[in-house]
């Protein structure tokens, strides 16, 4: 892929955070920290027992917020800083490792662990502290109406209009550490390819929609991705940009 791109769209998933020691949300065995996904990550579960669901996310928070970005996160921040083209990051991860790596233009399509949304007024509360049924909304003063700002199963991912726009406009689509089985993210490559983007995938193993990518690079993304970023930056330099 030796060309200068104008707009790069990078989709990151659980695989990039796994290398920072975070266990993966939406894992193939259907468990997350020994809880069944249907007990902690569906609207039904939250409506039935909001206190339990809050407790689950409150317990996860410290581990997730204390994790450190790895070379894959860091090289993407470097690419955003040094590359002349636009580089947008869309992540399926609820952690803040891209933020910690100093990336910008990050869309958290599955929400964010340090946010909660007031179901009364829509206010988004950003907090590293516990949020529970006693939390009072600083905007509308209602008590106990916060929901973790995590996209549960069956809910629409966030920022889809922006994502669609970036998919149509990008000339390079990069998928990092995603399984390629969770829709709609698994379908992003179709759209990007349809609108003419080059497509490349970084993953530990072969994925099911592997054939849709022009290039497939297997291995730890903390090793393969920095190499790729260096190639992009070298190409830019050789082109005298
Ligand atoms: Zn409110």
Image (spheres, helix red, strand yellow):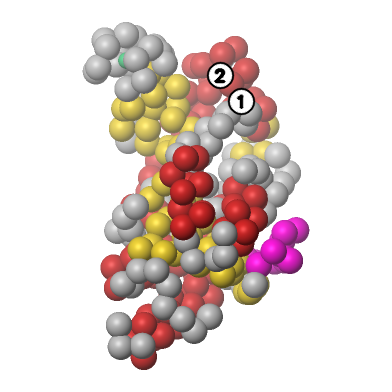
Q: Give ligand 1's quarter of the image.
A: top left
Seen at 60% across and 54% down, the residue is 191
Residue under pointer 2: 46
The region drawn magenta spans 202-213
With respect to residue 51, does 233 lie above or below?
below
Report, in whole angstroms, how far the alpha carbon at label 2 lies from the one at label 1.
Answer: 6 Å
Q: Residues within 10 Å of mark 2 (few under 14, many from 20)?
A: some
Q: Residues within 10 Å of mark 1 (few under 14, many from 20)?
A: some
What quarter of the picture does the C terminus occupy?
bottom left
Q: Position of residue 99 (x, y in %)?
A: 33, 52
Q: Is residue 106 visible?
A: yes
With respect to residue 235, does 41 lie above or below?
above
Seen at 51% across and 47% down, the residue is 164
Residue 118: image quadrant is top left
Query: How many dots with numbers?
Result: 2
Q: Position of residue 3 (x, y in %)?
A: 46, 81
Residue 219: image quadrant is bottom right
Circle 2 — which element?
helix
Circle 1 — which element?
loop
Seen at 56% across and 70% down, the residue is 198
Q: Position of residue 39 (x, y in %)?
A: 64, 25
């Amino acid at each position: 892929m030796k060309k200068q791109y104008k707009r790069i769209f990078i989709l990151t998933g659980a695989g990039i955070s796994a290398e920072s020691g975070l266990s993966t949300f939406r894992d193939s065995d259907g468990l997350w920290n020994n809880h069944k996904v249907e007990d902690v990550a569906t609207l039904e579960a939250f409506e039935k027992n909001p206190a339990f669901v809050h407790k689950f996310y409150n317990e996860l928070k410290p581990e997730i917020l204390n994790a450190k970005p790895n070379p894959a996160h860091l090289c993407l921040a470097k690419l955003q800083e040094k590359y002349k083209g636009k580089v947008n990051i869309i992540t399926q991860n609820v952690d803040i490792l891209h933020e910690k790596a100093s990336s910008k233009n990050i869309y958290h399509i599955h929400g964010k662990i340090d946010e909660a949304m007031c179901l009364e007024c829509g206010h988004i509360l950003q907090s590293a502290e516990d949020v529970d049924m006693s939390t009072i909304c600083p905007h509308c003063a209602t008590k106990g109406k916060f929901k973790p700002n995590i996209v549960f199963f069956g809910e629409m991912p966030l920022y889809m209009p922006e994502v669609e726009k970036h998919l149509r406009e990008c000339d390079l689509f990069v998928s990092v550490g995603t399984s390629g089985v969770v829709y709609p993210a698994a379908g992003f490559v179709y759209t990007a390819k349809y609108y003419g983007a080059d497509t490349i995938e970084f993953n530990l193993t072969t994925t099911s929609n592997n054939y849709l990518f022009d290039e497939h690079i297997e291995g730890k993304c903390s090793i393969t991705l920095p190499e790729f970023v260096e190639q992009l930056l070298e190409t830019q330099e050789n082109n005298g940009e």
